[in-house]
Amino acid sequence: MGPNVAVIGLVVEDMARSLAFYRRLGLDIPAEADGGPHVEVGLPGGLRLLFDTVETIHSFDPSWAPPAGSPRMSLGFQCDSPAGVDKLYRDLVAAGYEGHKEPWDAVWGMRYALVHDPDGNGVDLFCPIEA
């Protein structure tokens, strides 16, 4: 058996700010995690989402620097309905998060929207149009 994807890791400037964003997307993250340098969240199927502060990364990789330009990866969050995509997008933008592309009906049959988390990572919101 070869390697399996088990972890997705995000490097964050401000742990509390980043966790607040992901709580709005439905992740169950305890409030006491806001002050930690490393946080792990279990996802369906056994996958884990990790958050590490820049300081944590620098503790073992002093040469690490954030990438420049547009994000090269994104996390996708499936909503319950096409209207749910619109509502979540509006709620995130109203809360001060960056809306990158307003909701639209994509040619591949989904209601889709793009936002950026507080560190500029891409977050896709979607739902099949036929939902």
Image: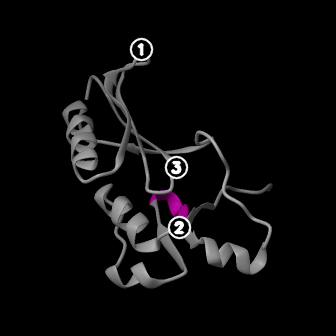
Whether residues under marks 1 and 3 lie with C-beta atoms below 8 angstroms apart, the answer is no
Is residue 45 one of those drawn in magenta? Answer: yes
Q: Type of residue at label 2? A: Glu
Dot 1 falls on a residue whose secondary structure is: loop
17 is higher (above) or lower (below) than 127 = below
Q: CA distance from mark 2 to mark 3?
A: 12 Å
**Drawn side of residue 21 relative to residue 72, left or right:** left
Q: Which residues are magenta?
A: 44-50
Q: Which mark is residue 13?
A: 2
> Mark 2, mark 1: which one is toward the viewer?
2
The residue depicted at 67 percent of the width and 50 percent of the height is: 67
Query: Quick one: label 3, few (<14), some, or many (20+) residues within 10 Å?
Result: some
Q: Position of residue 90 (x, y in %)?
A: 22, 41
Q: N-terminal of the two: label 1 or label 3?
A: 1
- Residue at image coords 34%, 50%: 97
* Quarter of the image where the N terminus is located: bottom right
Between the C-alphas of marks 2 and 1, the distance is 35 Å
Q: In the picture shown, does residue 20 fall above or below 30?
A: above
- Give the image location of residue 130, x and y in percent: 27, 23
Q: Which residue is mark 1?
A: 107
* Pointer 2 local density, CA inside 10 Å: few below 14, some 14–19, many at least 20: some
> Residue 125's mark?
none
Which one is in front in this view, the residue at disc 2 or the one at disc 3? 2
N-terminal of the two: label 2 or label 3?
2
Picture coordinates of residue 75, whole percent (x, y): 50, 47
Label at residue 121? 3
Type of colouring: one colour
Closer-to-camera residue (89/55)? 55
